[in-house]
Amino acid sequence: MALRPSILISALSLMAVLAVPTAAPAATANPTHDSGQSSGAVAVPDDSLRALASRVGLRIGTAVNTDALAANATYRQITADQFSSVTPENVMKWQVVEPTQGTYDWSAADQLVNFAKANGQLVRGHTLVWHSQLPSWFSTDGVTTSFTPQQVRDLLYKHVVDEVSHFRGQIWQWDVVNEAFNDDGTPRESVFYMAYQALGLNGLDYIADAFRWAHQADPKALLFYNDYNIEGLGPKSDAVYALAKQLLAQGVPIDGIGAQGHLDTQYGFPNQMQQNLQRFADLGLKVALTEVDVRTTLPVTTPEKLAQNADYIQMLEACLLVRACISYTVWGFGDAFSWVPSVFAGEGSADIYDENLQPKASYFALQQTLMLASGAPHRDGMGAGRR
Ligand code: G3I
């Protein structure tokens, strides 16, 4: 096992727990270079996903399980080496940051932000307004609440402004509103939607409010709408497209659309993903793949593995081919930490590293695609120019 070259960071005062260890446990004991995307000089393996993606200006991100980050040195090393952006999987959600009304707990999220700084990474903030993982004092089901509609609006304002202000200047992209539509393109009748309707407003007006409030609190953060099943052309992405157009026409400060990218091998690949991303880009918006993983039924067969690799690659290619696609984030990288088995019984193996944090074929598929993205080596010698 080769020694990992030292990491040059500007924030040397950060706690030792945030620094990655000096021995490389993963399969990437290779020469290093500055990823070229961060303000600090951070050395990462030349063939890491983040280094390869930096050649075309793309950020490769991962959702981070902060418990694993604190406890597992291999997990920490891979997070630092392979990714140029991190998303807290859970610790910026309302339920976690305000477990008791009026009492904030930013500790876990702050630690991740510090880890990102120490490792030359940007942070995707996730997520400000979502019907799920709400604090129990506010709503237990995402639909009902004991607060009046006006109180819901006031509490939403306070939550958005307080959280964005706390992290002001430290977040690259915020997922401001998450999953506001049903799969058929109708609005989700969440606690927010219902409150706004009860106030005599359009139920979806909470979205414009949240973007305006977030922008006031941190004018430099890129503000995203984020959803699943909007990767390809279809009724749900049509609804989000109409929303985006309307928000832009109203002067609402929206900067981007995040397509989550939770795929399953039993379904086909989303319809015309590149064209779909491009139509958002043509509105002047950034786009991002924000939560990529590809689940399958267990045990995994060879055809399913091949389908997973193809899905990972095709999503990356769709992003690479759209100039406005600025990041490709996997929703965690290790199967041992994946959300999938607890939600989809009998399914799993969705990530690019296995249960033991060894890179899988899907990791190498992404690596190869990124190598190709910056140009295959030109043939020379006997082969050059010959027909
Ligand atoms: O932290 C508590 C712990 O104290 C308790 O003992 C345990 C008992 O179940 O629950 C723990 O909370 C869990 C939390 O993850 C942290 O591990 C919740 O039950 C569990 O529901 C929660 O799941 C998260 C899920 O969002 C919630 O809907 C997943 O980790 C997370 O990956 C997932 O992420 C979402 C994105 O935010 C939005 N898009 C879809 C994506 C996948 O569902």
Image (cartoon, rainbow, N blue to C red):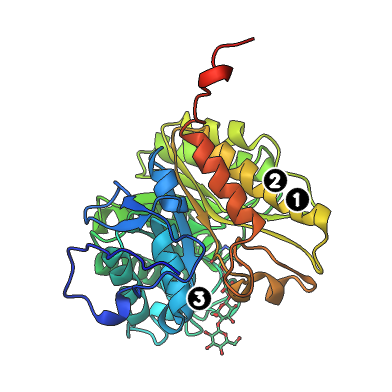
Figure check: 91 above or below 258: below
- What x and y, as percent, mark residue 381? 51, 20
Residue at 62%, 44% (x, y): give it.
Answer: 313
From the image, tell me which residue sits under label 3.
Answer: 134
Figure quadrant of the N terminus: bottom left
Ligand 1 neighbours mark 3 (CB distance < 8 Å): no
Q: Which labelled disc corresponds to residue 310?
A: 2
| Picture quadrant of residue 2 | bottom left
Q: Secondary structure at mark 3?
A: loop
Figure check: 133 above or below 84: below
Which of discs 3 and 2 lies nearer the camera? The answer is 2
Q: Are marks 3 and 2 in contact (CB under 8 Å)?
A: no
Which of discs 1 and 3 lies nearer the camera? The answer is 1
Q: Secondary structure at mark 1?
A: helix
- What x and y, as percent, mark residue 145? 53, 78
At label 1, counting other C-alpha atoms closer than 10 Å, the crowd grade (few under 14, some 14-19, many 20 or more) is some
In front: 114, or 288? Answer: 114
From the image, tell me which residue sits under label 1.
Answer: 306
Figure check: 9 above or below 76: above
Residue at 53%, 36% (x, y): give it.
Answer: 372
At label 3, counting other C-alpha atoms closer than 10 Å, the crowd grade (few under 14, some 14-19, many 20 or more) is many
